[in-house]
């Protein structure tokens, strides 16, 4: 098949049914499968937790999109994160970005630390700091990269971090949720594992929860497959179908949403009410060269801070009409939130705490003129 991701998004894992010709893969809801004698499995299927044809189709799809040999589907993005962390053992050290999704930090800091996993953070944009952190004390077993990061849109040089991690014998994991494989393919830059919250851009319609992981390592794939089955946090066949349906329009959605975000970011940067805009497509973004080398487009996520601080940010978020005040991101509709009290409340008081007045936008595919007018009216309302 072609290596063009626009075509892969539509056709990978979605061959017409050989019996009926149906162009949409059927949803296989059965929880168990008839065996032809003990151990006589048809197509390798025995029990729904261990394997399902609809889930296999989704796993084949995400592997193709990321250029990976193996794909794995889970019940949520955090279930996928958990299954990666199962690769660690008590006493191992995890080195993580200093700006990550609050739920990822909560899982590492509040859960896995209790089982002997030492978690440190560092600004992974600074390769000198990364090298120093890797060499300080126990060598990390895993380096966790989130790029662009949530919610400050930091962009990390995947190849640079992966090179340093590999030299130390550490695995590089990249959370590719914000970028999607349409904008960025981390395995091509040296990553060992790539993670997605499929709830976001891959599903794309705010109607399904899911997680995905890919790797080209047979050894890691064998361990992930064991953990996937043993822990059992697998998605339902219907959820897999919904994610696959969303993936089919990934390319066109990312193009439109990214264009909208770029327009709004530039407009916000010129507003007197706005202190700073965090968006990888800004000409003055500190990692502009990495963005151009590593990403097809800057993406559809942005955040900004207001001169008037947290109170004005709260009033702004309450005043929008097209931008819905809600957590999550990556769907066709535009969303607005304040990370500090919402998606990143779990990092409050830690080194990962985000500015109280930071506003995060997930820019959708609506008319950019309407989105701009909505923000303009809300900015005026927030000044009161």
Image (tube, grey):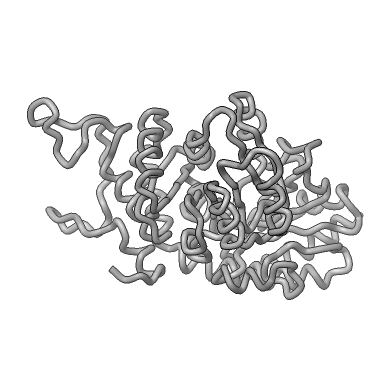
User: The N terminus lies in which quarter of the figure?
Assistant: bottom left
Left or right of 276? Residue 112 is left
Q: Residue placed at 66% from the left, 32% from the top?
A: 109
261 or 349: nearer the eye?
349
Foreground residue among 276 and 157: 157
362 versus 341 height, above or below:
below
Which residue is at 39% across, 54% downward?
A: 62
Q: Is residue 310 left or right of residue 286?
A: right
Q: Is residue 181 above or below residue 230?
A: below
Quadrant for the C terminus in the image = bottom right
Q: How many marks?
A: 0
Q: Quadrant of residue 115?
A: top right
Q: Is residue 216 visible?
A: yes
Horizontally, residue 23 falls left or right of residue 266, namely left
x and y percent of residue 67 in the render? 39, 61
Locate residue 121, reporting x and y percent: 70, 44
Image height check: is 170 above or below 182? above
Task: Answer yes or no: is residue 369 visible.
Answer: no
Question: Residue 113's x, y, as percent?
Answer: 64, 29
**Residue at left 57%, top 62%?**
159
Across and down, in percent, residue 271 comes to: 84, 69
Q: Would you place residue 260 above or below residue 168 in this image? A: below
């Amino acid at each position: 098949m072609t290596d063009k991701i626009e075509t892969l998004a539509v056709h990978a894992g979605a061959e017409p049914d050989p019996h009926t010709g149906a162009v949409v893969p059927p949803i296989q809801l059965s929880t168990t499968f008839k065996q032809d004698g003990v151990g006589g499995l048809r197509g390798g299927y025995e029990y729904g937790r261990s394997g399902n044809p609809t889930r296999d189709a989704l796993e084949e799809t995400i592997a193709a999109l990321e250029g990976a040999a193996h794909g794995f589907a889970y019940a949520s993005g955090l279930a996928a994160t958990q299954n990666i962390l199962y690769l660690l053992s008590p006493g191992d050290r995890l080195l993580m970005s200093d700006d990550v999704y609050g739920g990822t930090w909560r899982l590492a800091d509040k859960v896995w630390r209790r089982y002997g996993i030492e978690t440190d953070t560092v600004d992974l944009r600074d390769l000198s700091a990364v090298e120093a952190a890797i060499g300080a004390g126990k060598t990390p077993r895993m380096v966790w990269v989130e790029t662009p990061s949530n919610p400050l849109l930091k962009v990390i040089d995947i190849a640079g971090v992966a090179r340093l991690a590999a030299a130390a014998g550490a695995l590089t994991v990249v959370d590719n949720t914000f970028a999607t494989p349409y904008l960025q393919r981390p395995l091509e830059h040296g990553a060992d594992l790539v993670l997605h919250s499929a709830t976001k851009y891959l599903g794309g319609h705010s109607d399904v929860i899911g997680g995905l992981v890919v790797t080209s390592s047979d050894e890691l794939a064998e361990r992930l497959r064991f953990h996937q089955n043993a822990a059992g946090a697998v998605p339902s066949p219907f959820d897999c179908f919904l994610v696959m349906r969303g993936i089919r329009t990934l390319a066109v959605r990312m193009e439109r949403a990214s264009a909208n975000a770029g327009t709004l970011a530039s407009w916000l940067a010129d507003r007197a009410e706005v202190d700073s805009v965090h968006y990888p497509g800004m000409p003055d973004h500190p990692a502009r060269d990495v963005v151009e080398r590593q990403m097809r487009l800057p993406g559809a996520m942005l955040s900004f801070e207001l001169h008037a601080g947290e109170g004005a940010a709260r009033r702004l978020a309450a005043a929008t009409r097209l931008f819905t005040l809600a957590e999550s991101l990556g769907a066709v509709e535009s969303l607005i939130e304040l990370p500090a009290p919402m998606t990143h409340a779990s990092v409050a008081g830690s080194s990962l705490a985000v500015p109280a007045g930071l506003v995060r936008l997930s820019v959708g595919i609506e008319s950019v003129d309407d989105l701009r007018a909505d923000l303009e009216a809300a900015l005026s309302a927030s000044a009161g």
